[in-house]
Structures are given as structure tokens and as C-alpha cells.
Image: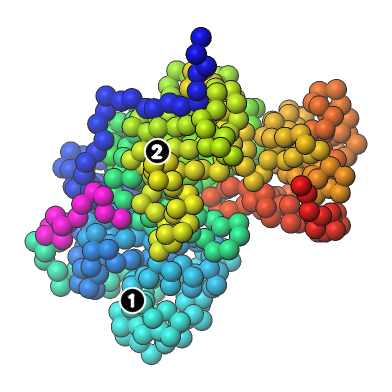
Amino acid sequence: MKEQLSYTSGASNQPLIGQTIGSLFDEIVELYPDKEAIVSHHQDIRLTYRQLKVQVDACARALAAAGLKKGERVGIWSPNCAEWAIVQYATAKIGAILVNINPSYRLHELEYALKQSGCRLLFTAGVFKKSDYIEMLYSLAPELNTSEPGKLSAEKLPQLQAIVHLGRSPYPGLYDWYSFLEEAEKTTPETLAERQALCCFDDPINIQYTSGTTGFPKGATLSHHNILNNGYFVAESMKFTSEDRLILPVPLYHCFGMVLGNLGCLTHGATIIYPSAGFEPEAVLRAAEQEHATAIYGVPTMFIAELEDPNFHKYNLSSLRTGIMAGAPCPIEVMKKVKTIMHMPEVQIAYGMTETSPVSTQTPPGTSLEKQVSTVGKVHPHLEIKIINPENQRVVPRGVAGELCTRGYSIMLGYWRDEAKTKEAIDPARWMHTGDLATMDEDGYLNIVGRIKDMIIRGGENIYPREIEEFLFTHPKVSEVQAIGVPDEKYGEEVMAWIKLKEGEMATEAEIKAYCQGKIAHYKIPRYIRFTESFPMTVTGKIRKIEMRQISVEELGLKKDAEIEMA
């Protein structure tokens, strides 16, 4: 019998959407004018699709009045709010490219993103958590103090001409949200319709900066076609209809929020609910009960926080049925609890990356519990997946680990103004090389076993951190765990585990190691254990293992080991 290779493609009876975001938006408004489109709990805002269109069109006309042309860049630097979605749809209508700026960026990162993308206009929040956005902008562009709104000329930001504060507060040199919308009167609805008609679905419409572990972030450039279709097919997998109501606690600046959340709901006439500006576990639970939500999205750490919230049992979550867990591997026990005590039996796992719009695989309805908790599902409609040997680029047999590559409508147009990095990521046959290590089983289900860069090589043995994490998570005192490799003079690398204990629990290194004895191979037992209250992570909830390694090397005094060159 011929050996089965790790390649699969997503056949589908559902055609791809050949429209722009603006075109589909108008169709959905016609179909569901009086359905709630957006509910923003922390702002006390409710908008039907008809009401949303009024604000979207006003914002689009104001952008046109500000002189924004097709292909020019508009930045947004804000936590979750209704205005975020309005700007998203308004920029799409006039063909401007929306630049998503991480709400946790500081001055240096903000300056880089604005300059590298060439933003002409920026929408900004006021204050969020420890970030005073307005103060940072005056620090970066002191010329604002003597500028008229829309006429900025800043030495450090030569292309930026206008800044809009997403609020009512007046600041020198800035529009506030409401005065900016009044600019819409300078552009007729007919002019907006003409601008919208000039847009094509293959046009770039979004730049998202990926978290760089070394150097500056790269700007993944995505088209209408990329993100509109991905949002649609993710929601299709969950059988979304206009009756669904989604709680979205993940940040809108990331694909998870603006594509799977906003566009997934838009394509089905569903309702999106923002429970808070930033993630708050109880706000999610409260909104789910009050809004009779049917779905919740989140990364595993968010679901863990919701399940462990001291008031969890006070909330009635019986209206829930589905949702997505993505962004990081999900511990098996967490998945079981989400399916049962959170009333989400149809919850699905999704896998992807910003450069692929983002989802490439998802656990389809009917997936067995075993595969739901041990895989990231099957290839998405209209996409291809292969797993290759990184050394010779050949497709590996089923069950053998290799680098996951994906191809299809979802692949980004490229990294903004970075042809060299684009060529490193996308090969001449348009395969996106993810850098993730994966296996494919006989049914086409994928299991992500780690990052190529995260794999621990101890004395010639390849160790996948996920395997150690899953095992240690079965310890009754462990709430969260992350495994990394740290340098070692003898073995090249040793295993280290960072462990967060459940509230009120105490444990010792010896206790954890004893738990491992006889249950996992001796070389997989962590040599080092660090008990922690939190993990370094990106704003989207992805663990920054490179930062964990840096901290551990410093704390353990392993700098000399790190300098040893290995064959």
C-alpha cells in the first residue's frame, strides 16, 4: 500500500465571496437593518445594522473630506470600542488601508509603526490602563500644540497629518470623534458611492504588525478577499446565523478580534458584543448572561481566568453553545470544563497566524472529544496544507513531524515594504512557511507540536514542550504551565517548567519532579522549575517563550552555557 503523505486540501460547496468589505456590509444592512450589530457594554452603546451604517458612512465621508485616497494608510491605536469597528468598515469603504496598532505599544514602537506604514491619519484612544495615549502623542509630535486639527506637520512623523481622539475631550491639534464626523458634510453620499465602487476585493485593506521576537515587527498586509472570506468560513464552521450573539474579549487590533469577531459576525448578520475595553473575566461572564450570548471567543488563558473567577457560579451561561479557543495550545482539562460547566458543547479549536488572515484549520462539528482536545482540526475550505521536512522541503509521511505550510486565498499579500522578509515566508509556489512543527493523522487532523524555534533538543533528543505541558497540567495543584529549553553545557539544552499554581495551593520543586517519575521519560522531566504568578505574553495572550528563556538564563546564571556553540 502506498504511503500516505501529509497533504490535504479543503474541498467546499460554499464559494468564496468575491466582494469588497464595503459591498458586503451594505448588503447585510439591507438584509438585517433592525438586528443589533454591535453592543459595547462598557460604553453603553447599542447599534442596529441600520444605525451602524449611518455612522460608518459618516466616518467614510469624513475620511474622504480629509483627503484620504485609496491605498493611503489610516492608523488606529485603541482598546476595544464601537468606534474601532466603525473605523474598520469606513476605511474599507473608501479603500484606505487600516493599520492596526497594538494598544500596549510605547513611544518607540508607535513611532516605528506610524513611520513604517506611512500613516496619514491616526485614530487614538485617550487613556487605557497604564497608557496615556494623548501624552505619548504630544511627546512624539509636540507640534500638535500649535497645529490646527488636520494640519499637523511633525518632524518625527512627517507623513502624519491628522489625529482623531476617540472621545469628546478637546485637545490642541486633534479632532475629537464627533467634530471629525461633522466633516462628513463636506463629502456627498454620491461621492462615497463612487469611491466605494473603485475598490477591488484583491486590494490591500489592512496592515497588522506581527510580534517580532527579534528586531522590529513586520507588517502583514491583507486584502478584502483575505479577511472577509476567513471571517465568513470560521463563522460557517460554527453554524452562525443572524440569531447568534458573540462575546468578544480578545483585542480588535488582532486578527482574532477584527476578522473572526467583527467580520465573522458581519458576514452572517450576527451581533458582536464587547464586554469591556480590555479583558476582564467577570465582564465576559456578566455580558454572556445579560445578552443571552450564544458564543464566546478567547485564548486558553482567558477561558482559564473565566473558569477560575470567584463569581463564576453566579452567572447563568445556559444560552451559550459554541465559540473558538485559539492562539495557544489548550490544556485538555480546560476544554472539558468549557464544554460542560460553561455550556459550550460545540466550542471549536482554530489555528492560524496573522499572515494567513488568520485561520488555516478548525475542528469541524462532530469532531470527537479526543480529537478536539488533541488537534487543531482539519484544513479550512479552499485552502491547502502540507507538512514538510524543513531540511529538504519534501512532504513527510502522515504521523511524522515537520514544518506546516499552507496555501490559498488566505495568504497575505506580503510584508509591507519588506520584500526580503516576504520571500523568506512565502516561497515561489505561494506556500506560506509557518515555522510551526506539526503532524497530520490519517483523517487529516493536525496537531501542532511546537515552534521549530521552541523545540528543545536535549542530548540529541527532540522534546516538544506541548507534551510536557499537557502532562504537568494533570497535576491537581497546577493552574497553568509552560515548558522551555534553557542552555546546558553537557546536554546542549535542559528542560525548564514555569508553573502557575491554583489559588491557595503550594508546591515544591521536589513534589513536581516526583509526580513526573515513572510517568514521562526521564529526559523530559524538568531539571529546573520556576513557580510564577504570570507569564510574559503578547496582548493577544500568546506566551513569549523567548522572553521566558531570557529571564531564566539570567536567574539561573546560565549565561556562560548560552555562549557555548553547539554542533
Q: How crowded is the residue under tag 2: few (<14 C-alpha within 10 Å), some, or many (20+)? A: many
Labels 2 and 1 touching (C-beta < 8 A)? no
- Left or right: residue 406 versus residue 268 is right
Residue at the spot of label 2 = 407
**Where on the picture, by quarter, is residue 415?**
bottom left
Q: Percent position (x, y) of residue 65?
A: 20, 72
Tag 1: amino acid = Ala
Q: Is residue 241 visible to us here?
A: yes
Which residue: 77% across, 36% down? Answer: 460
Disc with the residue nearer the chain's start (2 vs 1): 1
The secondary structure type at the circle numbered 2 is strand
Which residue: 19% across, 65% down? Answer: 61
Residue at the spot of label 1 = 162
- Left or right: residue 84 versus residue 434 is left
Q: Is residue 186 above or below residue 138?
A: above
Q: Nearer the viewer's eye, disc 2 or disc 1? A: 2
Q: Residue furthest bottom?
A: 146
Q: Which mark is residue 33?
A: none
Specify start and end residues of the magenta stretch as a single range: 193-204
Q: Residue furthest top?
A: 1
The secondary structure type at the circle numbered 1 is strand
- Left or right: residue 347 versus residue 487 is left
Q: Residue furthest right?
A: 510
Which residue: 55% across, 43% down? Answer: 435
Q: Is residue 289 visible to us here?
A: no
Q: Residue 477: say if magenta.
A: no
Q: How crowded is the residue under tag 1: few (<14 C-alpha within 10 Å), some, or many (20+)? A: many
Which residue: 40% across, 64% down? Answer: 417
Q: Residue furthest front?
A: 392
Tag 2: amino acid = Arg
Q: Percent position (x, y) of residue 38?
A: 33, 47
Q: Is residue 338 above or below residue 246?
A: above
